[in-house]
Image (spheres, helix red, strand yellow):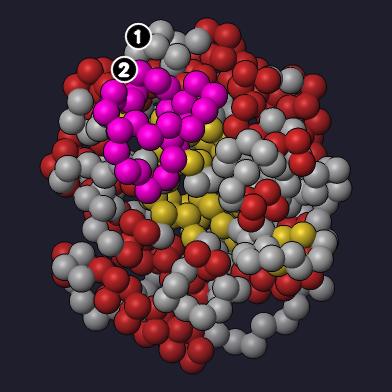
C-alpha cells in the first residue's frame, strides 16, 4: 500500500472541451498542466475521444497519437502522471461515437449520441458481443499502448468512462469476456501498467451486468465516480458520507483497492440555479470532503474537473442542455482559481495504516445484487450511524 493517496484532476481544456483533439493547442496544454502542477496535483485523467483517435474501424489517427504523446511529454516535465481513458464514449450527459459505431436503425437512447458534428438517434453497436467492433477496439488499445510504451508519465489505463451510460452488456458473461480480452490486449504490450475502468454510482444502484465483482476479476484496481448532487437516496447534496460510502462499498464488492476517479460539485461565484451552488457552498463541501478522506482509504482522489467551460461552448452539446456541466471547474473560465483551491493546494492525503473494516455490512457480496438499491439505501444508513459514533469532531483545515 502506498503511503500517499494520489491527488488528481480530470482534464479538458477550457476553450475546447471535448473538441480538444481536433483543436489541439500545445501552448494551452503547457499552460494548463503548469497550472495543475503548481497547485499540487500529481495525477491527470484524460479522455481519448473515440471518433478522433479511430475515425475508421481499421485506422488510427497518427496525428492524434502524436498529440497524445506530446501531452504526456509535457506532463512528465512537470512531474505529472496520467490515466488515459479509452472508448470515450460517454461524457457529461452525451455519447460521443464514431459513425462506424452506429447502426442504421434508430432507437430511443437514454443519452443522445453525438457523431460527426451532430446529434443522432441511431442505435449503438454493442461492443460486448460485436466481434468486428471488438477487433477494432483491440487495434486502438494496441496502437495507443505501443505509442506510450515505457512512458514515465503513464500511471494507469482506463478502459472507459461510465460505460454503462453508453450501453449494457447483454449479461455478465459477455462483460467478463470483453474485460478479459481488452485487459489482455493492454497487458500484452506492457503488463506493468495497471488497468482499471471508470464505474459510477449507478453501477451500484442497479445490476448493469458489469460492476465491481466482474471488473475486479481482470482489472488491477477499481474506480468509482461519486456525486452527492446526483443521489436521490439522501436529502443532502453536500453529504460527503456518500463519497466515502460508495468507495468503500465498491471495495467490499470487488475486494480490490479503489480510486475515487471523479468527485465534484458545480459552482459559480454566486448561487445560480438547480444543481449549481455558490463558491462559498462549494468550499464548505470540499472542506468537509477532505476532512472525511484524510487519512484516505483510497488509492487516489481525482476532482471533476479542471475548468469552467468557455461561454463560446455553451451552444454546443452537451453544454447546450446540461447547464450545470459548465461550472464543475476548479478554475474559472478566466483561469483564476476558485476560492476553495486554497484548501486543495496544500493537501496531502495520507493512506490509512489500519486495515479497513466493513462491520456495517451484514450481508455477503453475492447477496447484494439480488436487490441492489434496497441494500444500498439500508447499508448507507448503517454506515452513517457508524460514522456518527466513531468520527471525532473535525477541526477546520485553516
Give, as a single range, the part of the protein colored magenta.
95-122
State left or right for residue 291 relative to residue 242.
Answer: right
**What percent of the width, then of the height, locates residue 4?**
58, 54
**What percent of the width, then of the height, locates residue 255?**
29, 58
**What percent of the width, then of the height, locates residue 94?**
48, 41
Task: Give the labeled residue for mark 1.
Answer: 58
Q: Nearer the viewer, residue 16 or 336?
A: 16
Question: Which image quadrant for residue 108?
Answer: top left
State left or right for residue 223 relative to residue 263.
Answer: left
The span from disc 2 to disc 1 (Cα, nearest Å) is 6 Å
Identity of the residue drawn at 81% across and 66% down: 270
Identity of the residue drawn at 27% across and 75% down: 375
Q: Nearer the viewer, residue 220 or 237?
A: 237
Task: Give the labeled residue for mark 2.
Answer: 136
Q: Is residue 148 above or below residue 246?
A: above
Badge 1: residue crowd in 10 Å (few <14, some 14–19, many ≥20) = few
Identity of the residue drawn at 86% across and 48% down: 336
**What percent of the width, then of the height, locates residue 65?**
54, 14
Whether residues under marks 2 and 1 lie with C-beta atoms below 8 angstroms apart, the answer is: yes
Q: Nearer the viewer, residue 102 or 13?
A: 102
Residue 18 visible here? yes
Question: Which image quadrant for residue 56?
Answer: top left
* Residue 96 covered by magenta stretch: yes
SS at badge 2: helix
Number of labelled discs?
2
Identity of the residue drawn at 53% across and 33% down: 47
Residue 286 visible here? no
Amino acid at each position: 500500500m502506498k503511503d500517499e493517496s494520489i491527488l488528481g484532476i480530470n482534464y479538458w481544456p477550457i476553450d475546447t472541451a471535448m473538441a480538444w483533439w481536433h483543436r489541439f493547442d500545445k501552448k494551452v496544454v503547457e499552460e494548463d498542466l503548469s497550472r495543475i502542477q503548481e497547485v499540487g496535483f500529481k495525477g491527470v485523467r484524460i479522455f481519448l475521444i473515440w471518433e478522433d483517435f479511430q475515425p475508421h474501424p481499421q485506422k488510427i489517427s497518427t496525428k492524434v497519437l502524436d498529440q497524445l504523446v506530446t501531452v504526456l511529454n509535457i506532463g512528465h516535465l512537470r512531474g505529472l502522471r496520467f490515466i488515459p481513458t479509452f472508448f470515450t464514449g460517454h461524457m457529461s450527459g452525451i455519447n460521443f461515437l464514431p459513425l462506424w459505431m452506429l447502426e442504421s436503425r434508430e432507437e430511443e437512447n437514454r443519452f443522445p449520441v453525438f457523431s460527426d458534428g451532430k446529434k443522432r438517434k441511431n442505435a449503438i453497436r454493442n461492443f460486448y458481443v460485436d466481434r468486428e467492433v471488438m477487433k477494432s477496439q483491440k487495434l486502438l488499445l494496441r496502437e495507443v499502448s505501443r505509442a506510450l510504451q515505457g512512458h514515465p508519465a503513464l500511471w494507469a489505463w482506463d478502459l472507459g468512462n461510465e460505460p454503462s451510460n453508453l450501453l449494457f452488456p447483454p449479461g455478465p458473461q459477455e462483460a467478463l469476456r470483453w474485460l478479459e480480452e481488452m485487459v489482455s490486449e493492454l497487458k500484452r504490450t506492457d503488463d506493468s501498467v495497471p488497468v482499471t475502468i471508470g464505474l459510477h454510482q449507478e453501477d451500484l444502484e442497479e445490476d448493469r451486468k458489469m460492476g465491481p465483482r466482474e471488473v475486479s476479476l481482470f482489472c488491477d484496481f477499481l474506480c468509482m465516480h461519486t456525486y452527492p448532487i446526483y443521489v436521490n437516496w439522501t436529502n443532502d447534496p453536500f453529504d460527503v458520507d456518500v463519497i466515502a460510502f460508495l468507495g468503500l462499498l465498491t471495495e467490499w464488492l470487488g475486494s480490490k483497492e479503489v480510486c475515487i476517479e471523479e468527485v465534484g460539485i458545480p459552482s459559480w461565484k454566486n448561487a445560480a440555479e438547480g444543481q449549481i451552488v455558490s463558491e462559498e457552498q462549494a468550499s464548505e463541501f470540499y472542506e468537509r470532503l477532505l476532512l472525511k478522506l484524510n487519512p484516505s482509504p483510497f488509492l487516489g482522489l481525482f476532482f471533476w474537473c479542471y475548468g469552467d467551460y468557455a461561454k463560446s461552448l455553451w451552444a454546443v452539446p452537451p453544454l447546450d442542455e446540461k447547464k450545470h456541466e459548465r461550472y464543475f471547474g476548479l478554475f474559472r473560465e478566466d483561469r483564476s482559481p476558485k476560492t476553495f483551491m486554497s484548501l486543495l493546494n496544500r493537501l496531502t492525503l495520507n493512506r490509512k495504516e489500519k486495515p479497513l473494516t466493513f462491520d456495517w455490512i451484514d450481508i455477503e457480496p453475492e447477496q447484494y445484487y439480488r436487490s441492489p438499491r434496497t441494500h444500498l439505501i439500508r447499508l448507507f444508513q448503517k454506515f452513517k450511524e457508524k460514522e456518527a459514533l466513531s468520527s471525532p469532531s473535525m477541526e477546520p483545515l485553516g
